[in-house]
Image (spheres, rainbow, N blue to C red):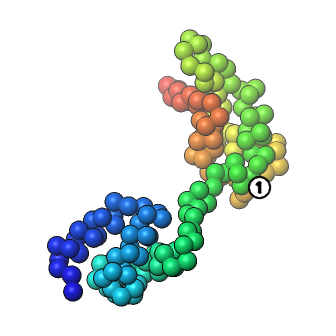
Amino acid sequence: MLTEKVKSTLKDAAKKLTGIKKRAFMAQVTQDYFDGSARKAETYLGWSRQAVGLGLKELQTKIVCLDNYAARGRKKTEDNLPNLEEDIRSLVDSQSQADPSFQSTFCYARISARAVREALIEQKGYQDYELPTRQTIGDILNRNGYRLKKRKKQNL
């Protein structure tokens, strides 16, 4: 049917395309060389049968499906717990100071992420299981413009 050189060229072209253009390309190749069979395209070229099938439907109906990439992945903790950011800010603002050299806009927090997590449980009424880890709280602090100073070791 197709030589190995043609197959590799088609695969390479499909790799360089994304989304709607990729599906349209795969559908057109499938119609031209594989009798419109998504299974044959999957067998010979290794393409996703579902993507080829969707491309064929789009080609047939002239209705294009939009990709919703923004809905993928895990959401930020602040999105899942809307009051968390405000509660962290209320705890940390009293424990922070501006950069003494005024070279950055960050505030330095004199409280650790672990202490913030414990204060959220004790003072703000959060449960241990609903709060993110210490590392995630540190990331939230960094996103909100706070920098955590490392604790200095005390020599005995």
Q: Is residue 108 left or right of residue 52?
A: right
Closer-to-camera residue (13/102): 13
Q: Which residue is mark 1?
A: 127
Confirm whether residue 122 shows in the render. Answer: no
Q: x, y percentage for residue 128?
A: 72, 55
Residue at left offset 71%, top offset 59%: 129
Quadrant placement of the N terminus: bottom left
Q: Which amino acid type is marked by label 1?
A: Gln
Query: Which residue of the protein is positioned furthest toward the top in this rendering?
Result: 101
Confirm whether residue 70 shows in the render. Answer: yes
Q: Is residue 36 left or right of residue 20?
A: left
Q: x, y percentage for residue 66?
A: 57, 64
Q: Note whether 141 is above or below 69 in the view shown.
A: above
Q: Is residue 12 left or right of residue 91?
A: left
Q: Is residue 124 left or right of residue 16?
A: right
Residue at left offset 66%, top offset 32%: 111
Q: Note whether 47 is above or below 116 in the view shown.
A: below
Residue at left offset 63%, top offset 41%: 140
Closer-to-camera residue (60/56): 60
Residue at left offset 55%, top offset 68%: 64
Closer-to-camera residue (36/113): 36
Q: Note whether 137 is above or below 142 in the view shown.
A: below
